[in-house]
């Protein structure tokens, strides 16, 4: 019951904040290039992809997993016959 009440209060506070921000908005007398928004999305996506890559490599290292490329290279090396001279 306590968590439902607390969540409801957080939702109502967020709605109130949004309404107040909309009520006190001033017109912006400026120009924003339409490409600026796309650039911001691109930067955010790149940061997300980089963060996921780093997180994946840290999790692999933590659990001692090897990458699929290493597994493939190891199996190819073990299946090729070695010639002795």
Image (tube, grey):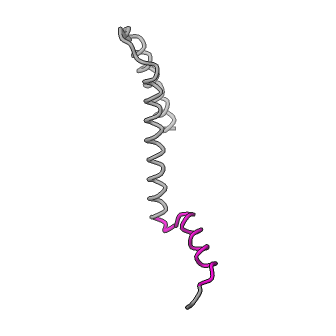
Residue at (44% x, 16% y) in the render: 19
Residue at (58% x, 76% y) in the render: 77
Q: Is residue 54 above or below residue 61?
A: above
Q: From the image, which quarter does the C terminus lie in?
A: bottom right
Foreground residue among 19 and 66: 66
Task: Determine whether, in the image, residue 83 is placed left or right of residue 16.
Answer: right
Residue at (42% x, 14% y) in the render: 22
Residue 76 placement (x, y as % from top left): 61, 73
Residue at (44% x, 47% y) in the render: 51
Quadrant position of residue 17: top left
Q: Is residue 73 magenta?
A: yes
Residue 46 placement (x, y as % from top left): 46, 40
Residue 6 placement (x, y as % from top left): 46, 34
Residue 53 placement (x, y as % from top left): 47, 51
Would you say the magenta stretch is mainly helix, strand or loop?
helix
Q: Which residues are magenta?
A: 62-82
Foreground residue among 50 and 33: 33
Q: Is residue 81 above or below residue 52?
A: below
Q: Is residue 75 magenta?
A: yes
Q: Tally the marks.
A: 0
Task: Determine whether, in the image, residue 1 is placed left or right of residue 24.
Answer: right
């Amino acid at each position: 019951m306590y968590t439902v009440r607390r969540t409801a209060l957080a939702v109502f506070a967020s709605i109130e904040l949004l309404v107040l921000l909309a009520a006190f908005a001033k017109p912006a007398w400026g120009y924003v290039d339409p490409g600026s928004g796309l650039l911001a999305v691109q930067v955010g996506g790149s940061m997300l992809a980089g963060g996921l890559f780093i997180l994946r490599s840290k999790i692999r290292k933590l659990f001692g997993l090897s990458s699929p490329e290493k597994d493939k290279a190891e199996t190819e090396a073990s299946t090729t016959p070695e010639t002795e001279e």
